[in-house]
Structures are given as structure tokens and as C-alpha cells.
Image (spheres, grey):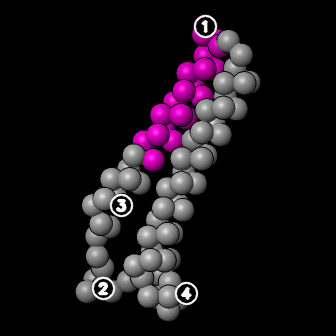
Amino acid sequence: MVSVPAAERTPMPEPLRQAVDQLVSEAVMNCQEVHRDTEPDIARDWKWMTLIRATDASDAMDMASVLIAAYCQQHTDIETLSS
């Protein structure tokens, strides 16, 4: 992991942090639903529901990573990103 000097550290902008927080929360919620849908007493069509919820969780995390990458690309010097 690259160490950034304390003087160069900045917090994540609040709107970006809130968006990432929402997407991560959505992913966790979908993972919880995967877990719940596989419980023996309520499992209906567990394969179908597990696939849907796991895909939704993956999509939410993908959106979070793309959002962070897009922000960094727009607001960070290209040389900083490549180092």
C-alpha cells in the first residue's frame, strides 16, 4: 500500500462519501437477503432469489468503485493517479 504524507491527505468529499455509503449499504442489504432466502423455513426458490440478490450486491459494489474512480479521474492530477 502506498503511504501518503499527512500534509497531502484530504477527507473524501461528503457528497461522494454519502453516495458510496448508500451503495455499500445496498450491497450489504442484498447480501443479508441472500442469507435470509437460504434459511430452511422460508426458502422458496432459493437458487433464483440468491442469484438475483447476489447480482444486485455485486452491481452496487461495482457502482461504488466506478463512482470513486470517476471522481478521482475528474478531480486528481493524472500523474498522481499513475504513481
Of labels 3 and 2, earlier in sequence is 2
Q: Are marks 1 and 3 in contact (CB under 8 Å)?
A: no
Marks 3 and 2: which is nearer the front?
3
Of labels 1 and 4, earlier in sequence is 1
Amino acid bearing label 2: Glu
Disc 3 is placed on an element classified as: helix
Give the spatial CA distance, label 3 vs label 4: 21 Å
Give the spatial CA distance, label 3 vs label 2: 19 Å
Query: Which span of residues is magenta-colored?
Result: 23-43
Which residue is pictured at 50% across the width and 92% down the height? 79
In the depicted structure, whether residue 44 falls above or below residue 77:
above
Q: Is 73 covered by the magenta stretch?
A: no
**Front position in the image: 34 or 17:** 17
Q: Residue 83: percent from the left, percent from the top?
A: 52, 89
Residue located beneath label 2 in the image: 8
Residue located beneath label 1 in the image: 41
Residue located beneath label 4 in the image: 82
Which residue is pictured at 69% across the width and 20% down the height? 46
